[in-house]
Amino acid sequence: MSREPGRAGPDDGADVVDVLGVGFGPSNLALALAVQEHNERAAPGEGRIQAAFVEQQAAFGWHRGMLLEGATMQVSFLKDLVTMRDPTSPRSFLNYLQGQGRLADFINTKTMFPSRVEFHDYLEWCAADVRHLVSYGTRAVGVQPVTGPDGTVDQLDVVLRDADGDASTARVVRTRNLVLATGLVPWLPAGGQRGPCVWHNSELLPRLRELGHGRRHSRRFVVVGAGQSAAETTSYLHERVDAAEVHSVFSRYGYSPADDTSFANRIFDPEAVDHFYAASGEVKQMLMDYHANTNYSVVDPELIQELYRRAYQEQVGGEQRLFVHGACRVAEVRGSEVGPIEVDIEFLPTGNPRTVTADVLVYATGYRPIDPSAFLGDVGAWCRRAEDGELLVERDYRLHTVEPLHAGIYLQGPTEHTHGISSTLLSTTAVRAGEILDSVLGHRRPTPELPVAHDQAGEPATVGPGWGDPGVVTS
């Protein structure tokens, strides 16, 4: 289905996919599973979806740098890639366990939260099932409109390139719908800059493996951040046999516990997305402020208690290796690329500084969404924005576009401003994939074999995108 770049005219008879997904993390993997199951149920030639996905990694992987031993998921296994969409799906976490011969053993653990390593293995198991839909080692670099004879743009040409190649590897895939799930990018605070001795926690495990090759001596670590990943990184480094000292630095006075109580968790329910989408801007902000402590810069209470216990026991024993610097910030980092480095830590209430000599500084300071505007290029001019510059997104995750663009562009991830706090999390991934698939099916032009509904005036009725909003006009 690939073609040479530079072709942006009407369809020339070459293959056109119904859906092209860019990025293949859990979100587009869930969509691929939904497409696969839809096609398995559909009779030959009746409503089947032709889909393709591209991923710049050489193989499936999700936060591999933080697959720490002992780390568990913060979301129930029932919120896997399929169950909330279809509890009978054969791609559920429970069916995965059955296939691995561990179902009874997992039940006996009496937990809803599998280890991160095991859940990642489940994701790889799912990815292998739809391997035929994915081109790994492939990067999408741009989008071109395909203008039809009537001036409308019903299709898009997506320019692809080998992830490690140059412009000579470029080719084009034409699609009726584009689904962007490019994930989040690691974020460092102002002045932070990665280097041989300064990392982001997303690369923790491979960096530690490189650090350990051929050298076994005690090392001093500084970890910046107040969230779950920062606390996990601190705990993991402190347990290492080569850790002389671990310094945890954050601007709060102490780690804040995550609100994982049952009522608060309703903010992650699929119905909460409907409520949030329909709310006013003022209410949206209120809900985000009220429930930020379910997800942002918070830590499991058990891990907080464990870190405090370790620090206290070291005080009692007179050999302290774990230092927690609350109400502090990293003011300056000095040193060579090969280390050691000098880290100036400022105590915010008084401004008093303290300098720590370290071998490694790890920023566990979170991620930021990727703005798709640069990737969309000229096509982005047909995507409407709010007064604050945010892209307008329909309830079915389809960008609000204007004439002449009729091809669908969907976002998976950077929709927190319209769909709420679960947008970048696993909680609603399965349901969202089903909604996007329903929307793609709903926006298809009716085939001659199907009856076309008419309104009272005798005009053809519009078809909603799968979630029952009569105000959405289809292409």
Image: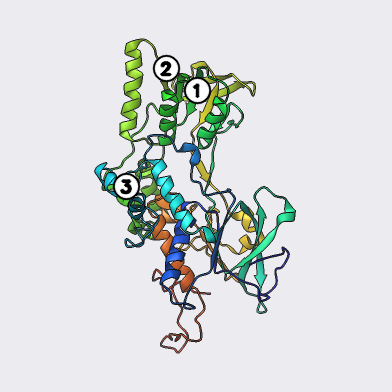
Seen at 47% across and 63% down, the residue is 394
Q: Is residue 1 left or right of residue 240?
A: right
Comes first in the chain, label 1 or label 2: 1
Q: Residue at x 67, y 75 (%)?
A: 10
Residue type at tag 3:
Arg
Label 1 crowd (10 A; few <14 / some 14-19 / many >=20): many
Disc 1 or disc 3, which is closer to the eye?
3
Q: Is residue 177 visible?
A: yes
Mark 2, residue position: 321
- Say what secondary structure mark 3 lies in: loop
Label 1, on which residue? 221
Q: Is residue 314 above or below residue 162?
A: above
Which image quarter holds the N terminus? bottom right
Q: Name the residue furthest top.
A: 318
Q: Quadrant of residue 376?
A: bottom right
* Residue 83, disc: none
